[in-house]
Image (tube, rainbow, N blue to C red):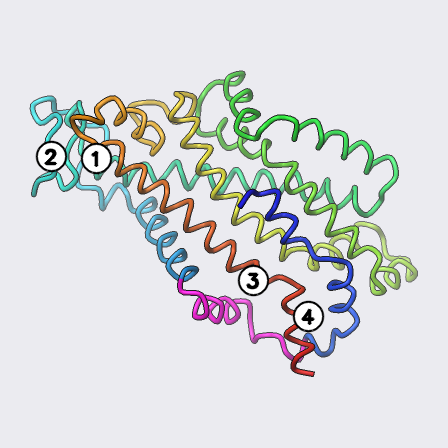
Amino acid sequence: MSEAAAARDAAPSPDSAATAAAAPTAAIADAPPSMLGALVQALRADPGAAAGCLVILLFALAALLAPWIAPYDPTSQNIARAMQGPSAAYWLGTDEFGRDLLSRIIHGARPALLVGVFSVVVSVAIGVPIGMLAGYHMGWIDRVVGWGVDIMLALPSLLFALMIVALLGPSTGVLVVAIGISHVPIFVRLARGSTLVVRGLEYVSQARSFGASDFHILRRHVLPNIVGPLIIMATLSIAGAIREEASLSFLGLGVQAPQPSWGNLIRDGVAEVLEAPQLAILPGIALTLAVLAFNMVGDALRDMLDPRDLTAATSKKH
């Protein structure tokens, strides 16, 4: 599923938002005891999402504890042990420089998750305020924002990030900024569409009639009611950011050698794919599992937070 299609599915429709706002008492009465409780119920109902959460947790622990759980230094070379197959000493074998593949895959989780999470933080921090302002004020602000988003969407996000990295030079910080900026249009459009729905609801009009400032309305009344779709899109965008970090590293514009990244591990392994296919296949499996896990969790969050489903469930109970 593309991120643009996910944004359309995540955004609340006017009818569902209006229905949910018209019966706040019923919604509160039937709300789960906490967000954590709702998440636990969703994971019980969806084994795939539970598996995705487990995979994300394992990768997060591997990234945090990499210096202690990796059996070897990921950059330490030992030519005498180069291109060894799996053994008791090297569980996944070694590469052309005698570096332990398992240690490099474990350490490769660090830039993947770091860039994936913080690039989405950059996207949200920039895109959501701009989208909320455009959707709330409309007029010339909306037109200017719309033109800017259309210009950015004219280029694929990976190509846009590649241009920024090529200009500023490859580093982890530049990757975070480049991928984050390339995903800004997604959050601008989602925040704008959701704000357009919420701004016309009765409680927003009442707050405005009582003299509440625009900042107060956006912070207290609009943002809390559009955060669900934003959480969904943020989760799905992490998967896309991890994929783009690996793509840029594969092209030599991401994490630089000798530091390991799943992308540059795959690139180096492709050169030895006939002699030692595990050098490319195993990092590819790690990358696929991470992306798939975030996508599965994002789908589960959409099912849990979709206002159309919540409204339908409330209607059935009353």
Q: Is residue 38 magenta?
A: yes
**Side (left or right) of 106 relative to 80:** right
| Alpha carbons under labels 3 and 4: distance apart | 12 Å
Q: Residue furthest bottom?
A: 318
Residue 202 numbered mark, or none = none
Q: Earlier in the sequence, mark 1 or mark 4?
A: 1
Q: Is residue 152 magenta?
A: no
Q: Amino acid at mark 4?
A: Thr
Q: Which residue is mark 2?
A: 85
- Graded by Cα atoms within 10 Å as few (under 14), some (14 to 19) or many (20 or more), the crowding at tag 1 reads many
Helix, strand, or loop for circle 3? helix
| Alpha carbons under labels 4 and 2: distance apart | 56 Å
Q: Which residue is mark 1?
A: 278
Q: Which residue is mark 3?
A: 303
Q: Which residue is mark 4?
A: 311
Helix, strand, or loop for circle 1? helix
- Graded by Cα atoms within 10 Å as few (under 14), some (14 to 19) or many (20 or more), the crowding at tag 3 reads some
- Picture quadrant of residue 317: bottom right
Q: Earlier in the sequence, mark 3 or mark 2?
A: 2
Q: Earlier in the sequence, mark 4 or mark 2?
A: 2
> Answer yes or no: do the residues labelled 3 and 2 have beta carbons within 8 Å?
no
